[in-house]
Amino acid sequence: MTETTKPASEAPQRCGLIAIVGRPNVGKSTLLNALVGQKVSITSDKAQTTRHRITGVRTVDEAQFVFVDTPGFQTKHNAALNRTLNRTVHGVLADVDLVLFVVEAGRFGLDDAKVLALLPEDKPVVLIANKLDAVHRRAELAPWLKGMQERRNFAEFVPLSAKKAADVTRLFNILKPYLPAQGWFYEEDALTDRSEKFLASEIIREKLFRLTGDELPYTSTVVIDKWEEEGELRRISASIVVERDAHKGMIIGQGGERLKRIGSESRQELEHLMDGRVFLELWVKVRSGWADSEEHLRSYGYE
């Protein structure tokens, strides 16, 4: 068979690491989940819910996209947790082939500028103008885009809504040429390099933030204490770790109702994700100062 008649399935494989960066709450995790086609990163209206590098994988034809979701850069606080989060972002950027810089379409503030200033000069950066569905007059984007292009020579400009499948498909086609020609890192059907145990702790943490709203400080985490598998049944025991007794009360709620709801919604999503039955037991523990303790951070799995 000649090279010109080679079928598409035999095109040389491409594979690359792509970082998704931006200030907290611009929709990075929503975009990652849409790109992967399944939830691998938690989403919440509360800023700063992503704390670990989350790797999501999607293989489209000959190209394998390995996405790395990062914590939003922390610019306000200097606790050990925030320093750890920022180290994670810098570590990710050093390793990748391409950077997706996510902003809200039509908006660019001081926190966005701080993230942009930290992006490496030697990597192609694609400007993702997310939440396009929230822009009422598209004509207003033209002067905004001109201002953005003056800030950096972006490799591409992609306005989109992470919630629209057609926009996500279009993004894959735009990013593909930036992936190095090399063999895939993962199997074709892989979606994430994270374990079920890690995904379980993240899902519980998501329900925690969603159901406590702004009452609970983001210095709360989830630790899996016990994980047992009996055929299709998983028995999971987890601790929600907070810094103060008052936070414990917020999570438990009147008559334990809020904790029951966190547990119930987490269990339902875990059963759907793992395609089996889940028995979930939740506890709330107070560990004063854990977010400013390097030792505690390591023991809870922070890199």
Image (spheres, grey):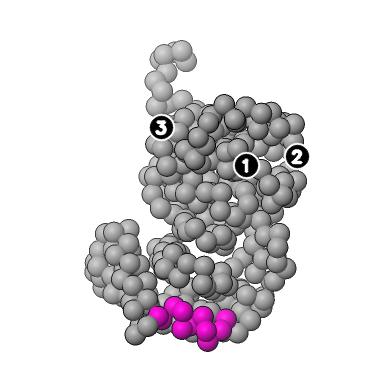
Location of the C terminus (image quadrant)? bottom right
Residue at image position (41%, 68%) is 211
**Coordinates of residue 62 in the picture (x, y in percent):** 45, 31
Q: Which residues are magenta?
A: 243-253
**Coordinates of residue 65 in the picture (x, y in percent):** 50, 40
Residue 52 picture quarter: bottom right
Residue on which the image places disc 3: 166
Question: For the residue carrying disc 2, how many other residues have a C-alpha within 10 Å: few (<14), some (14-19), or many (20+)?
Answer: few
- Separation of marks 3 and 1 at Cα, in angstroms: 23 Å
Q: Nearer the viewer, residue 175 or 258?
A: 258
Residue at image position (33%, 67%) is 265
Majority SS type along the magenta span? helix
Q: Earlier in the sequence, mark 3 or mark 2?
A: 2
In what element is the residue under mark 2?
A: loop
Residue on which the image places disc 1: 107
- Separation of marks 3 and 2 at Cα, in angstroms: 30 Å
Q: Is residue 245 magenta?
A: yes
Question: For the residue carrying disc 3, how many other residues have a C-alpha within 10 Å: few (<14), some (14-19), or many (20+)?
Answer: few
Vertical arrangement, residue 55 with respect to residue 17, above or below:
below
**Coordinates of residue 291 in the picture (x, y in percent):** 62, 75
Residue on which the image places disc 2: 121
Task: Tell me if label 1 and label 2 are in contact, CB under 8 Å.
Answer: no
